[in-house]
Image (cartoon, coloured by chain):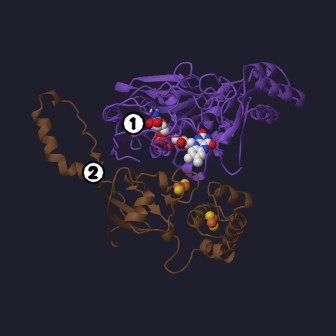
Chain colours: A brown, B purple
Amino acid sequence: MKKEENKPAGKKGFSRRNFLRGTGLTAAGMVVGTKGFAGEFAPAAAPVYGPDEVPVTLSVNDGSYQTLARPDEVLVDTLRERLDLTGTKLVCGRGACSACTVMVDDKPVCSCLTLTMEVQDKKITTIEGVADGDELHPIQQAFIDEDASMCGFCTPGMIMSCKSLLDRNSNPSLDEVKKAVRGNLCRCGTYPHVFKATLKAAERMG
Amino acid sequence: MKKFTWVQPDNIDEAQRQINAVTATIATGKTIQGAAVIKAGGVDLLDLMKENIIAPAKIVSINALPGLGKIGFDEKSGLRIGALVKLSDLEENAEIKKHYAALHESVSHAATPQIRNMATLGGNLAQRPRCWYFRSEDHKCLKKGGTKCFAQEGQNQIHGIFNTEICPCVHSSSVSTALVAFGAQVEITGAKGKLRNVPLAEFFVSPQVDVTRENILERGEIITALTVPAPPKGQKSWYIKQAAKESYDWALADAAVVAQMSGDTIKDVKIVLGAAAPTPYRATAAEQLLRGQKVSEKLAVQVGTAAVEGATPLAHNAYKVPMFKAIVKECVLNLV
Ligand SMILES: Cc1cc2nc3c(=O)[nH]c(=O)nc-3n(C[C@H](O)[C@H](O)[C@H](O)COP(=O)(O)OP(=O)(O)OC[C@H]3O[C@@H](n4cnc5c(N)ncnc54)[C@H](O)[C@@H]3O)c2cc1C
Ligand code: FES
Ligand code: FES
């Protein structure tokens, strides 16, 4: 794993363009030499990746990471196993509990059903990117103050859902908070505390 | 998940060259050399792969195909939704909320906020059933090319109450319940850009036609859009989904009612039940009762009863009958 702090957060991480640049000469040579293509527009075939590891570039929490991933690798595994970002949790792996919630282009999604290959040109935010250095985000502080975490396994996903709500709506109603965490399962039953914490955070953020 | 190769073409011809199978075919165990299937949001596809129901050799991501991510609305020509539009985009669309209330309701009650941010409309229509026997690697059921439907005598709580003889799996797209009631059409692009437009109601395939698949899609065909007719004057609609828990869950019963009203008299109406049959189910007898009538509590109850006429519930799902009666009644009352 290599982290390049200074590189601008990779916008065009997906390397189709680079790939084409790299093989451009060969492709052009082929077209010139093939009579059937004369005068026709022959679009270059899209590159096929895998099945083994390929280099990928990911933009996570404002840093750009270069690592490897297999095409069948889902984002939660890349984050946890390759980038050591273990805040994001894997529980059901089937989209049914939201423990693995991260934001892709500012929208909460399940990282257990997201192929790493397909988020290379996207902005990824994980629970590690919610605090500002040592300073907790108000939603994190409110979770502590309101005892909104018990075993803590659902907490990172829960916080991502609540933060996403607050990003969109600075003054949510109780009903809106409930809707925002609809998909987040908590086996410890912290829901009432989660609701309170989110409303409190909204109040503090004013 | 088994390993696979991955490709993301940026034009539809190239995508079609890469695709050589539909997921339904490979789920029957039929071997297709280098099976390459379509992936959109991946919510259903990856689930099937994680459960070892399918193991395609290649995934063809259609997410970079241009022009499939837009919603267009015009009072005259109606609604056009690109196949890659996410359920959350549909949910947030103000025109859909205003002109197609039942569609807005169905989308905002489907799945979780996270899944709605990932799931595309095309993938939603082409998703496979949630029957636990179908989803279990250990049960080689009819849908997977086996000889037995385990739901007939097994745990059939979530299954259908109509057309249950062959395989009582219900179609799991609750969004289609509303879309069929609006008379939506699916635009399918085949090889060489050949288009076919099919009423959504005819897109779905019943077990009598072919138990191993739920829709008419042939190899290489890509859903490119869904169109919904312009709302006629006086169109009112409503949708209700009943699930085991309120937060989010698959529908146990859902219903959409779309009516053309003149004052509080119903000129024409479509009533569609979801999670009732292998395909979205038109309750035509119930529709007949409503045509030309004024909505009243008494009539709404009768319409609810007529909607489940002829139902043949299984050993563990008779509870769905009163459930459908109740939600159809509520939908009808909601029109006025
Ligand atoms: C927890 C949970 C709850 C859910 N609840 C609901 C619910 O209440 N209501 C509901 O309706 N759904 C529900 N779903 C299902 C979800 O909406 C679908 O799985 C999703 O819409 C599939 O879309 P996708 O883009 O991810 O499709 P994919 O998984 O990418 O594809 C699904 C299938 O369609 C094919 N396909 C995809 N796009 C096209 C296309 N354009 N043309 C041709 N074939 C195509 C693929 O080959 C594949 O076989 C739920 C899912 C989960 C995980
Ligand atoms: S682990 Fe992703 S939704 Fe449960
Ligand atoms: S705190 Fe234990 S699962 Fe939520």
Quadrant assignment for the C terminus of chain B: top right
The structure residue drawn at horizontal position 42% and vertical position 63%, both measured from the top left corner, is A79
Mark 1 C-beta to ligand 1 under 8 Å = yes
- Ligand 2, what quadrant? bottom right
Can residue B101 be seen here? The reply is: no
Circle 2 crowding by C-alpha within 10 Å: few under 14, some 14–19, many from 20: few
Circle 2: element type: helix
Residue at 51%, 25% in the rendered image: B147
Q: Can you give x and y, in whole percent of width and height, for residue B121 in the image?
A: 53, 38
Residue sticking out furthest to the bottom: A134
Q: Where is residue A196 in the image (x, y as percent from the top left)?
A: 72, 68
* Position above or below: A35 against A5: above
Q: Report the side of B33 relative to B74 (left or right).
A: left
Please name the amino acid that badge 1 sits on: Val
- Horizontal side of residue B62 vs B259, given as left or right: left
- Closest to the observer: B176 or A96? A96
Q: Can residue B42 be seen in this view?
A: yes
Q: Quadrant of residue A152?
A: bottom right
* Residue matched to label 1: B37
**Which residue is denoted by mark 2 in the rendering?**
A17
